[in-house]
Image (cartoon, coloured by chain):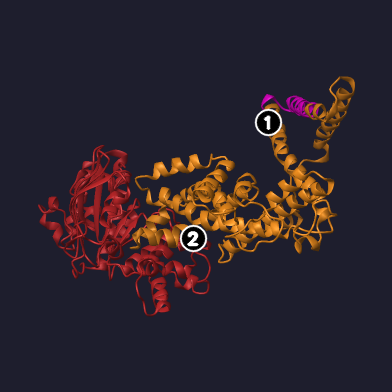
Chain colours: A red, B orange
Amino acid sequence: MSSQANENKSNPSNSSQPVQPDSEENMNQNKTATTGGTRERAQVSQHSLSDVAKNRSTSKGVSHNFGSGLEAKGVHAWFGSKHVLEDISMNFDTGTVTALIGPSGCGKSTFIRTLNRMHEFIPTAALAGEVYLDSKDIYAPGVDVTKIRLKIGMVFQKPNPFPSMTIKENVLSGIKLAQLKVDNQTELLESCLRRAGLWDEVKDRLDEYGGALSGGQQQRLCIARSLAVNPQVLLMDEPCSALDPGSTLRIEETIRELSESISIVIVTHNMQQAARVSDYTGFFLSDGGPGRLVELGTTSDIFSNPKEKRTEDYVTGRFG
Amino acid sequence: MSTNTLMAKPSRPWKPTPKSLLPDFIGALVTAFGTLAIVAATPLKGKLGFVIVLILMAIATTSILSAVRKDRKAALNSTTTVLVYVAAAFVIVPLISILWEIITKGATGVSLNIFQNDMSATASDAPLTEGGLLHAIIGTVYLIFFASIVSTPVGILAALYIVEVKGRFAGLVRFFVQAMSGIPSIVAGLFIYAVWMIGLGNSYNAAAGAAALAILMIPTVARTSEEVLKLIPNDLREAGLAMGATQWRTVAMIVIPAAKSGLITAVILGIARVAGETAPLLLTIGGADGINLNPFSGNNSALPYYVWKNLSLGSEVAVQRAWLGVFILIVVVFIFFTLARVLGAAKGQKR
């Protein structure tokens, strides 16, 4: 349970996984606090989301705590003089899925871009704090940034297969780009495409160009591509925002399978999705100033028993 | 429903019917006869007067027709449509007339002979069946080839510096590239003449001509490449970098392949810019009537030079030879274009 933010340590009740009876009670209290028509709506959405989250946590069980994973400590970020992120501390253990939710412009994407040093490509960007991978600061001087990005893969919001490469070349592009040596490329190609849930659809057309696939297939191709270099952590920046429900479902299945072996951080605007796939959820919010991590907890806590009023308002759809 | 489906016939209800086209047809007739009448009745004579009257009449009739049938907005739409067609015609008509002129006057002299002989043993006013322009073709191929070899890497690397590296001097480089594209071609020739011939004491040769052409070609290649590279979405660069690639690997494996067809266009535009240049060649290649296979030593010829020389000789046969040279020049440039496209598409971006 290392994935708790410091501010949440005050409440011990959420450190044990099956919290259902407790949360049910709290939820009823919360409901009585709301009034009129909003209550009806809140009730419905809260029920469904917390149910989804609970199903998820019971099916997944207690998180596996092997590997030290990724840790962000007191991360701040700036664009020019604009302070966009303030003091974010989070742990991402191996074998867990962490969802970051929050309204647009609250710094979720900026935060995950600080995790694999993509943040620094924006010319005016600045940063404070530390990010540790296997207890080593990735921002320490002398660290080879390309090695960091090999270990911390990223899937972007828009599917972006390399247009000049075939499906096969796309999957294996990471090997070539990072100049790695792989003994059996055919095997790697198949295993990556299988893990991304794309193999059956493309096994007969591996020499077609990546652009010939549908949007959902392209996104899964991008996931397969990032798996080929065997990352420890996979960052996903709204990977399903441009996809239809079927493709989204396939990608969620993929996330579930991948989470057995690596840790996944997913930014999403779809709270159903956060409830379905994640073990932990962090709620980001910006009140005009820099974005803050308002609440971090197990997904079932965030959706059924949030400690912060603002979190509850957000997950029940009352604002944002 | 099923009968309806069987009865259904594909039709295009948005297409104009003969009935709705009738007013347009009458309008066209009015325009044509009105123009003829005005030209006949007024002192506006000649082709220019006819064209101006035709354009004005076309605007007037279509606008009035639209205004009567629909409203003011439709009239404005018709007026704009006519103006756009006129503007397009102003571009296409000169192009077609140039090509027509060159083909009718130049292609008549084409025979196998001219590709086998040079002018070293032939007087310029000898009939067209004697002599040829093989020496000029060889010279032009050398010039274009060497100019491209120099300016393609320099131009594309300069564009990469501006767009990808975004180095400290990117703005300065862009400024100089723009300034360079304004250099008059004779100045480029003079520069090579001053540095290469007078300064370093070399003599005329094809390589010097290619160097002068490269000076003219680099800014075209660099500026077009820059625009092409800017069109490559940033997503692709980020995706490459996020996979643990260095910037150089990302550019070489992702950005350049994605921009390949555009970069080839940049080179083609550069070739088009220099292929017909005459002025710098007058100062650098020296001119020759015989074949010179060595591009690094001795006077050489080129198709533009051949045209210029024959035109200045002025005899009837020489002018015919000049037309022939222009025609062959266009064919050679076209071959280079096709070659670049074929080579560029060899590994294919079939999408």
**Residue A86 placed where, x, y %?**
20, 45
| Residue of label 1 | B80
Disc assigned to residue B257: 2
In the picture provided, is B280 more to the left or to the right than B255? right
In the picture provided, is B152 more to the left or to the right than A290? right
Q: Chain of mark 1?
A: B
Q: Kindly report the distance in space between the C-alpha atoms of the residues bearing marks 2 and 1.
A: 41 Å
Picture quarter with the N terminus of chain A = bottom left
Marked residue nearer the N-terminal end (2 or 1):
1
Categorize mark 2 by other alpha carbons within 10 Å: few (<14), some (14-19), many (20+): some
Instruction: Pick whichever, B114 or B51, lies toward us.
Output: B114
Q: Residue furthest top?
A: B42
- The overriding secondary structure of the stretch rendered in magenta is helix
Q: Residue at x 30, y 67 (%)?
A: A231
Q: Is residue B196 above or below residue B48?
A: below
| Span highlighted in magenta in the image | B53-73
Which mark's residue is nearer the viewer, 2 or 1?
2
**Looking at the picture, which amino acid does disc 2 mark?**
Pro
Instruction: Pick whichever, B214 or A57, lies toward us.
Output: B214
**Looking at the picture, which amino acid does disc 1 mark?**
Thr
Tell me the SS state at disc 2: helix
**Residue A53 placed where, x, y %?**
28, 59
**Residue A240 placed where, x, y %?**
40, 56
Q: Residue at x 53, y 68 (%)?
A: A208
In the picture provided, is A24 more to the left or to the right than B16? left
Q: Quadrant of residue A18?
A: bottom left
Q: Is residue A73 visible?
A: yes
Q: Is residue B259 visible?
A: no
Instruction: Pick whichever, B106 or A261, lies toward us.
Output: B106
Tell me the SS state at disc 1: helix
